[in-house]
Image (cartoon, coloured by chain):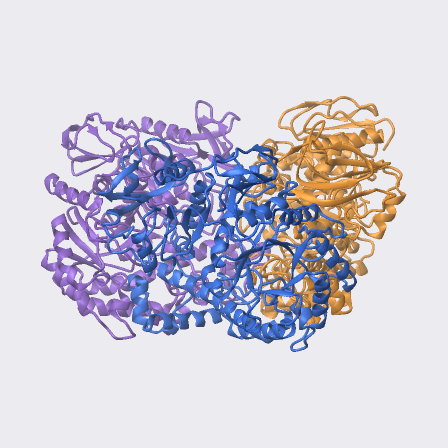
Chain colours: A orange, B blue, C purple
Amino acid sequence: MINPALGVCYYPEHWSEEVWEQDAARMAEVGIAFVRIGEFAWSKLEPTPGYLQFDWIIRSMDVLGRHGLKVIFCTPTATPPRWMVDKHPDMLAVDANGRQKGFGSRRHYDFSHLGYREESARITQLLADAVASHPALGGWQTDNEYGCHGTTYSYSPAAKVGFQRWLAEKYGTVEALNEAWGNVFWSMEYNRFDQVELPNLLVCEPAPAHDLDYRRYASDQVAAFNKVQYDILKAKRPDLPVIHNFMGRYTEFDHYDVAKSLDVAAWDAYPIGHLAVSTEPEEVKRQYLRQGEPDYQAFHHDLYRTVGHGRWWIMEQQPGPVNWADFNPDPLPGMARLWAWEAFAHGAEVVSYFRWRQAPFAQEQMHAGLLRPDSEPAPAYHEALQVAQELKSIGITGAASKGRVGLVYDYQSEWAWDVQPQAKGFTHGAHVRALYAAFRRHGLDIDILPPSTTSFAGYDIIAIPALFAWNDELRTAISEFDGHLLIGPRSGSKTQNFAIPPRLAPDLPSNLLDLKVLRIDSIDPSLEIEVKGSGSVHHWRERIETKANVVIEDTEGWPVLVNQGKLYYLGGTGTKALVHRVVDYLIAEADLVTLNLPAGVRCRTRDGLRVYVNYNAGPATLTLAHDETGYVLGTAEIPAAGVTIARLATAG
Amino acid sequence: MINPALGVCYYPEHWSEEVWEQDAARMAEVGIAFVRIGEFAWSKLEPTPGYLQFDWIIRSMDVLGRHGLKVIFCTPTATPPRWMVDKHPDMLAVDANGRQKGFGSRRHYDFSHLGYREESARITQLLADAVASHPALGGWQTDNEYGCHGTTYSYSPAAKVGFQRWLAEKYGTVEALNEAWGNVFWSMEYNRFDQVELPNLLVCEPAPAHDLDYRRYASDQVAAFNKVQYDILKAKRPDLPVIHNFMGRYTEFDHYDVAKSLDVAAWDAYPIGHLAVSTEPEEVKRQYLRQGEPDYQAFHHDLYRTVGHGRWWIMEQQPGPVNWADFNPDPLPGMARLWAWEAFAHGAEVVSYFRWRQAPFAQEQMHAGLLRPDSEPAPAYHEALQVAQELKSIGITGAASKGRVGLVYDYQSEWAWDVQPQAKGFTHGAHVRALYAAFRRHGLDIDILPPSTTSFAGYDIIAIPALFAWNDELRTAISEFDGHLLIGPRSGSKTQNFAIPPRLAPDLPSNLLDLKVLRIDSIDPSLEIEVKGSGSVHHWRERIETKANVVIEDTEGWPVLVNQGKLYYLGGTGTKALVHRVVDYLIAEADLVTLNLPAGVRCRTRDGLRVYVNYNAGPATLTLAHDETGYVLGTAEIPAAGVTIARLATAG
Amino acid sequence: MINPALGVCYYPEHWSEEVWEQDAARMAEVGIAFVRIGEFAWSKLEPTPGYLQFDWIIRSMDVLGRHGLKVIFCTPTATPPRWMVDKHPDMLAVDANGRQKGFGSRRHYDFSHLGYREESARITQLLADAVASHPALGGWQTDNEYGCHGTTYSYSPAAKVGFQRWLAEKYGTVEALNEAWGNVFWSMEYNRFDQVELPNLLVCEPAPAHDLDYRRYASDQVAAFNKVQYDILKAKRPDLPVIHNFMGRYTEFDHYDVAKSLDVAAWDAYPIGHLAVSTEPEEVKRQYLRQGEPDYQAFHHDLYRTVGHGRWWIMEQQPGPVNWADFNPDPLPGMARLWAWEAFAHGAEVVSYFRWRQAPFAQEQMHAGLLRPDSEPAPAYHEALQVAQELKSIGITGAASKGRVGLVYDYQSEWAWDVQPQAKGFTHGAHVRALYAAFRRHGLDIDILPPSTTSFAGYDIIAIPALFAWNDELRTAISEFDGHLLIGPRSGSKTQNFAIPPRLAPDLPSNLLDLKVLRIDSIDPSLEIEVKGSGSVHHWRERIETKANVVIEDTEGWPVLVNQGKLYYLGGTGTKALVHRVVDYLIAEADLVTLNLPAGVRCRTRDGLRVYVNYNAGPATLTLAHDETGYVLGTAEIPAAGVTIARLATAG
């Protein structure tokens, strides 16, 4: 692990070589340690096929190195040059409407295209050979933002052939595939694998197992594409981390799988842009217009810490207004500092601002940098400088504290409920984040757990929000867990082949949970059915038959929350009030100590420190907690966009 | 006619052969008489081209027959197997955006494709030969839900050639076509029929006559497709009914025309799903969330009674939550019974629940059946059993009573006002149903009449809501009718070639109605122009010049309702209040005796009985009507989702 | 210039030749002077390739001429016949989704298709040869409504090749293009011009300079297409005006450029239809439902007066309900007169109603004419007659008075802010019209100025609302202007190559304006930031650093209106209240005399007369202004849809 440090994204190819030196000097002045370069530079590195021009980028590494900066060197495969398309005209992806995508922006390649996969290996090898021994080299990044702009899926001839082969390997016989997908249903049976179609442009929806397998296939191609680069880079410099910069809310491929060939997971954090394009209610969008939604970043920090096997970075951190949402507000003064500190509190090794200098040309010319296009400092320049100095004075190190609460997050469940929502607007992600926020408002540290988790030991509470199908690992983990366990609606309602399990959802042995979901009552989320006590169910409501203990029932008498020992089952989606009530009930049952946080304030502990961040547009007042000895940064009066750090009595 | 009976849809190919026997036994226990099978089974009946596997389905008929069940045997042409697409790659339809639809769901054939039409004849003949003499056979169903998923229209090469030939036959010369369509307008004149294009992907809208002729052509292909099967089945067993299961609110082809080759019209009734996908106001959707809109089913019952020449079934009856709307609520307890009774009151012969057992796999796994996926009874199981027992005890037979009110419903008018709305959101269907509901709220029996009606004799009131163009039959019927006749806005505003008639709308001789529509004032439906007295016009408002008597005028002085003798003309669309006022006025003028129904309660008479159904979520209280002698089922206190049946003094 | 006169659009090919004589006689009776013919008649003029049938149209000119009517003869190139598509199958345009558009409506040609451009020249030459010497000929119209139905853009192979050639000519070397577009950004560099793609169907957005160049290219094709016809027609009859009928709110090509090959600019004015399809707020749509938005027409009158080098017509004037909006209300009685008078007040030579008789067939059968389909007069018939008589009695002549205020309107800025809105919903057009309306409410005459203006001499106030990039002409005009100059947000924020200028927006020398836009705060328009005093900024808000004088600042302390001498800079978009406040401030500073107009009343001066029009649905009361001697038409009591004309003390 690397001790907390700052980074920045830099594009030497965008600027005259004369300014590199001054740029590097100023980066060092700010206190930046890492500089990411190269991810869009292929046309400068290989202007025509085979004509390699690596000198300039090596010279840029020389300059950066001279100023003590470490380089994260990227493979340039997200932006193949125009000549590549002449060489492989069928490397372009095809959208769900059957239209081939063209050259002229970025990510114009099909993950299924094996010819391009070889080109990607070729340029990776050539670059690795050229720069691996450079003293400034500090790590690698593969490609850039896999899946961005909806590029995980393609409906090209290459994807079709790839899918057919993948199915043949998975199922062995076409009869097995027909059985798994339930193809008898509408005479959808295939005679041969080469008859299988992609699940787009059908008359109505495909079999859900067909759709889900296609998504699994597509996810596997991303993992395979990444692995090719990883293996080359790792072979060259086993000591340096290979990183990929993932994104927020992009779930079209299984990040756990891709990260099997990564040493560190990074993600690109644009809090204000993310909120702008989100489906959050208008009042939330207004309240946090210049800050971002307070739990959105933290959720992803915790997720990518797990994806990255405990190691994670922010590779691109929003420094000011961005260019890509419908509206792009100016952040509150202080947010570029707050976001960095929040990331470090959740265990980030590096927070790297995107980008050094705002580019005056091309697509992202309205995207702020640490410098303005005229090279004067933008507001974030000064905030980054402050963070660097504070890091030095505070000296935070080590890993993020282990959480008290674990949440199981599963990409396949994202896909499954997208394939078959049954209640429009139900998304796995929003459902998980609602639970996450309900725990976090009490100041509890949370860990995200993959569906491959085999043991929940060490956690007080585990939540499995809406897992579509059980696997053996989780069955074991559940049965052996002695803490409090919350299983949410839809969990276990399908088999791995997307069928209703024979004993119905939630498909658990009755000694664990004696409960059956008989059918679903799904209704428009604007309609609410009140729950006895307080809160309401809406949207997704299960008709439950159970011999277990009913903790909460709705005013029509249907069970909402049921328990059997320490296992709790929640049979519907609720209003915020109900989700809070359920989580508060669990916390009380598990006898967890919680914090009393002002609204809009959040915290996380690391290295014996608790970092408080204030997402409000106004000040808030903290109370020194039972386990805190005092403040090492800031005070109990935490201003808008402020950061206060408390020292814990016993290091966490 | 068959005396009222229950049916169910069954898929022997979905289940292990071992469970057939028990399933059949339980069906018989419930009191089911008819079992529909086979409509999606082609890949099991002919797994590879010419390799016929009919044994299993005959065995399933044996099993069903042993339990006294009659089989409705379906042609499997709605789901051609995958190998069929290999054989006829151009049999796939093309959507309006020019994209060929793929294999992997259902209805993936083009009605214009003559090769597939032959395949459909071939399999129909083979199956008819194989099962026609089976003792359990009780009737046939052709295909399944023609037009579902927007499959009436295709923009394929086959459709283009077919359309050109159809036009050549209709018009004889291209000059006649140019004249009929008004092609001189924008130099759209053709020199030859083979130059005619389909009306999709144009720069702006096609000539309305072009669009309308294309829809007529497409409708004719559905009729022709159906006739091929009908002729084969009928030749084989002239004694058995050939049925097709139509749908609600699907009007893309002329059901009267298709039914020329049918003995019985059936429709698939999903009241809650229909309401969910409808354009009803939000308050109606909430009020009837778990019941369906109270007039929607009845309208279709009356429509399909006419389509079926007096004979009609429900082939698929919703038994619980469905899977295909955005939200799929659980019905109120009792609705599966109510819906059946309402259908029988309107003259249904058979109400057949879809489906026997919920399938745990494939697209419709969230669609309820009479049994749950684990073979336990779902709520509708018990309700069906109750209906069967009640049918036996009540002994209702014969036809539905002839209505006092007749409504002319015309598919071409649906198309015409879709082709040229002039006021966005005006739909023929909604306009007709508003009038239907206004009559029905008074407990009046209503019949739907086709535009080919030649006499209105026997009716007290006839309404022609918005007929786009007169034909000779209707002109005769109107001039000879001595009851009260309401003609609605837009009626007679076009010729059959979609042109404004020389004497302008409503294009009637002045001795019948001395009135001209000078021009149209169409405005956003949220704007209302008050009518003197009460109610408002909105949306569509005709500027009328008339020498007839103005019954109602708006506050700006324009005529709204005009009469000349017993002929009434309504010159605009109105708020519900205005539609009620106009209908109430007519009922009073015609001196009809009406019932005083509680809100949410509806009724229909058949066989000397009046069946009341309560669509409310709470109870209602009936008043014994002037012509009723007492209740034979239920009481005046009719519970939520309840049914009460009164006996009439003189059988209707 | 032609003295004010009426015209009408006539389609002899739509009617039996027998009625031509009577039609012509009635036109003369109404007082019509000009009759436009021929623009959709190609299939009648050349029914098959080379088979010319011009006799009938010449006979129609004979008839019209006999009644003293002058003919505007149109080239029929907006509707090439079906056989043309057989001859040039690739002449059809391709939409942004890659779908080729079909035959069957109109404007089905690609401006980039050189083969069709030759066909257009051929038919123009043939028709010019045939009718140029006809005594009834009064002028020409090229094609019809360039760009209507989104036809400026095409993504066809022809467009691609044309674009590549255009780029090669513009940039000379591919390196220059790569530099201009900033292609280094995402490895988008081209090696050869023939690799350049059209900017559609990309993975994400193209480089903005790419997009803008494509729009410039497409605009140039319209100009080139028009020039071919102009040169032929002009060569034939140098004395007669060549006109094109442009539209409202269609800005996809540069009208100034197209009009370089026109003598007169015309536009087609459908006030009610325009409002219906506009993005005006609902309350405006309701208030002016039957009148049209009060400043919409005037803005276009002033725009086309400039486009037409001082000469302009209305070629199509709405006479009653139209057919093409979602809702098509009946105009208030009097509007067909009001619209004509308003046009004449703004300097129109001819107001030509569309159309003579409502066509009972084809696409526009619901579009009103001066006659109904049954040849009886529609309301506008009588209103046109009244206008003709009033014109005779008033005797208005000469040009529209020069404005006190000049507004710079630039088509490229329309495109630029569409290419890169940065704040969704910001449109150059709406922004310009808001300023236009704020000046006009004070009764000030306004002129629209092109971006090629070299001097602002003679104006009291100049506004440059949101010009994307400066050019040398405007820089000169600004620096030499001694009146009050308002420069709006976004002005000068880009170079001609769509890059941020090195000294940042507004990119003016500090001696003119010492101000920099540091970054943009763009927010949802529903959010408002109050301005000290009154009004609010919203949507687009610039973070300004300035040494100039801050006139208005917002409640957060950011400058909103700044001045340096007589140059004012507005750093954001404002609510109506703020726009009014800014404009009122400028008017006061410039010491302009204004009028006190009732709400909904507007005016313009011409030839020593001030024409008042009342867009309200009720009456209003005028005050005789300081410079008026009395009324020559109407009185101070101006009724709904009324016109009052005052005489000025000193002719304007």
Is residue B386 at all visible to an observer of this figure?
yes
Q: Nearer the viewer, residue B133 or C134?
A: B133
Percent x, y of residue C106: 35, 61
Q: Nearer the viewer, residue A564 or B386?
A: B386
Percent x, y of residue C536: 46, 29
- Name the residue rendered at 65%, 32% in the picture: A334
Is residue A397 at all visible to an observer of this figure?
no
- Name the residue rendered at 86%, 26% in the picture: A649
- Name the residue rendered at 43%, 42% in the picture: B439
Lateral position of residue B364 relative to residue B459, left or right:
right
Lateral position of residue C145 relative to residue C140, left or right:
right
Percent x, y of residue B88: 57, 74
Relative to A642, say whether C14 is above or below.
below
Lateral position of residue C97 relative to residue C391, left or right:
right
Task: Give the image quarter of residue B55.
Answer: bottom right
The quarter in which the N terminus of chain A is drawn is top right
Percent x, y of residue C206: 53, 55
Lateral position of residue B320 relative to residue C180, left or right:
right
The quarter in which the C terminus of chain A is drawn is top right
